[in-house]
Structures are given as structure tokens and as C-alpha cells.
């Protein structure tokens, strides 16, 4: 009798990953082009693959949800040795604008812009969340946010992240 | 076997890079009926592993894969909507 129950329980557990929706949670802490694209590429692909996707924007990532800065994501060449520009040049006025322009020109050939990516993500059902403590820190209110964003805190994030089929990434 | 299947729809993602082929495929598969077949053309070298993973995760069946020597090399996927 016990054996039968155990077998049934085992079957139920084994069957679960087939049916349960996998979840992708990405914490977006940065607000520069090179840090935001990977988040959106993974998020849109995850949603297209049937995952439940949550993007949790915190610290500089919040700039993406602020309607005043949402379309102004830049690329900084400072402190980025992989870009090959020495910091003493990268820090000169206009260098961030130049690097951003060059990168965006290159990106345009293959990828949508960040605002387009954001729209695509929303269309695919990716959920956008604003970090409530960061909003306090940056003096943001609900009115400052782009539409379609909900405000959550750390415990909501931990709630998704602790789901058995969740993958959590910090970017 | 796979050759005898006729695609209801063909999606051309040639020239697109990740994540576009997967995203466009997932949109296109919703436009055909369950059991019907979608043909996807791609040039992205990541399209094979990416669409294989997509098929595994979504359950849509990858019926056939073919590679056409280029240039550019074109990957041809035959996908059946299963749900």
C-alpha cells in the first residue's frame, strides 16, 4: 500500500517539470546600453519560449522605466578596458555621446532599439517591475514611470526567485 | 518522410541575428493551426542550437533540419505546431 502511494507521488513529481511553466527573473541593476541589451534579449527570448519572465529594475536600471530617461540609454567608454579606449581619453567631454552614437549605429543593423525592445518585451508578456526602495532613493513617483510597470519590493522578487522552476540572473 | 510534409507558412529570418529568429518563429507558430507545419529559413549560425532549445522548451516539434551550402549558408527548419 505504501509502495503504491510512493510510486504515485514519484510519478507526480516526475511529471511536474513537463507542465509547470518555467520562470526567468532578471534583475537589471545597470542603465547603460551594453548592460541592458543582454537583459532584453534574454527576456524576449524567454517569453517567446514560453517562460514567465519578470524584469526587476533596480538602481541605474530604473532609468529605463523613468519616462524622462527611458529612451536615452547610453554607452560609457569610461572604465571599460574591453572597448580599447584609455580612460584619459574616454573621460573627455562628448566621448560618451560619440561611443553611444557609434554603438547605436552598429546595433541598428541587427537589433531593435531599446524602446522597441521594451515594446516587444511587453507584447510578448514580459512583466516589468520597478523597485520600490530605488524609487525612494531616486525621488521617483508612480507618475514618473512609463506605462505598464508595477511597483514591487524585495519580497516579491524573492517570491518569484524561490519558485522551483525559476532561473534568476543579475545583470 | 519529412520531405512529404507541406508547410502552411514560410518564415524568412535570413539576415536576422539572435534573438530575432526565435522570436519571429514563436510569433509565426501561433499563426498556424495545431498540427500544421511552419518552415523557417535562417542564416544566423546560432539558429540551429537556439531553435532546437526552443522546440524542446515549447514542445513544438522540429520535424526536419537542412543546411543549404551558400554563400550565405541557409538553415531550413520544419516545425510542427503541437499545442
Image (cartoon, coloured by chain):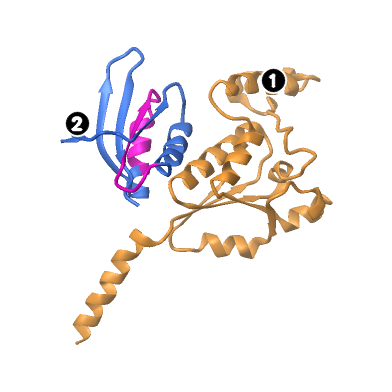
Q: Position of residue A72 (x, y in %)?
A: 74, 32
Residue designated by label 2: B3
**Residue at 68% across / 61% down in the picture?**
A153
Residue at the extreme bottom: A1
Residue designated by label 1: A101
Asked whether residue A165 is in view, the answer is yes
Residues shaded magenta: B32-54
Residue B47 included in the magenta stretch of the image = yes
**Residue at 60% across / 36% down in the picture?**
A117
Q: Position of residue A56 (x, y in %)?
A: 63, 52
Residue B7, picture quadrant: top left
Residue B29 included in the magenta stretch of the image = no
The chain that appears orange in the image is A
The chain that appears blue in the image is B
- Image mark 1: chain: A
Indicate left or right for A51 with A10 as reference: right
- Residue B34 against residue A8 in the figure, above or below: above
Q: Nearer the viewer, residue B8 or B73?
A: B8
Amino acid at each position: 500500500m505504501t509502495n503504491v502511494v510512493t510510486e504515485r507521488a514519484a510519478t507526480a513529481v516526475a511529471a511536474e517539470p513537463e507542465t509547470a511553466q518555467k520562470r526567468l527573473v532578471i534583475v537589471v541593476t545597470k542603465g547603460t546600453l551594453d548592460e541592458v541589451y543582454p537583459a532584453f534579449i534574454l527576456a524576449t527570448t524567454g517569453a517567446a519560449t514560453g517562460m514567465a519572465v519578470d524584469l526587476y529594475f533596480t538602481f541605474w536600471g530604473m532609468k529605463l522605466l523613468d519616462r524622462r530617461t527611458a529612451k536615452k540609454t547610453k554607452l560609457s567608454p569610461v572604465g571599460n578596458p574591453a572597448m580599447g579606449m584609455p580612460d584619459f581619453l574616454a573621460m573627455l567631454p562628448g566621448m560618451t555621446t560619440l561611443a553611444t552614437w557609434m554603438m547605436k549605429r552598429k546595433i541598428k543593423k541587427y537589433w531593435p532599439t531599446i524602446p522597441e525592445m521594451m515594446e516587444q518585451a511587453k507584447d510578448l508578456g514580459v512583466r516589468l517591475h520597478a523597485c520600490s526602495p530605488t524609487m525612494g532613493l531616486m525621488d521617483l513617483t508612480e507618475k514618473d514611470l512609463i506605462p505598464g510597470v508595477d511597483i514591487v519590493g524585495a519580497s516579491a522578487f524573492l517570491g518569484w526567485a524561490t519558485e522551483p522552476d525559476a532561473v534568476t540572473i543579475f545583470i | 518522410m519529412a520531405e512529404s510534409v507541406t508547410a502552411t507558412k514560410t518564415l524568412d529570418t535570413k539576415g536576422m541575428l539572435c534573438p530575432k529568429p526565435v522570436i519571429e518563429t514563436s510569433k509565426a507558430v501561433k499563426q498556424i493551426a495545431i498540427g500544421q507545419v511552419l518552415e523557417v529559413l535562417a542564416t544566423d549560425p546560432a539558429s540551429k542550437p537556439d531553435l532546437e532549445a526552443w522546440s524542446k522548451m515549447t514542445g513544438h516539434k522540429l520535424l526536419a533540419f537542412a543546411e543549404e551550402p551558400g554563400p550565405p549558408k541557409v538553415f531550413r527548419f520544419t516545425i510542427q505546431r503541437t499545442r
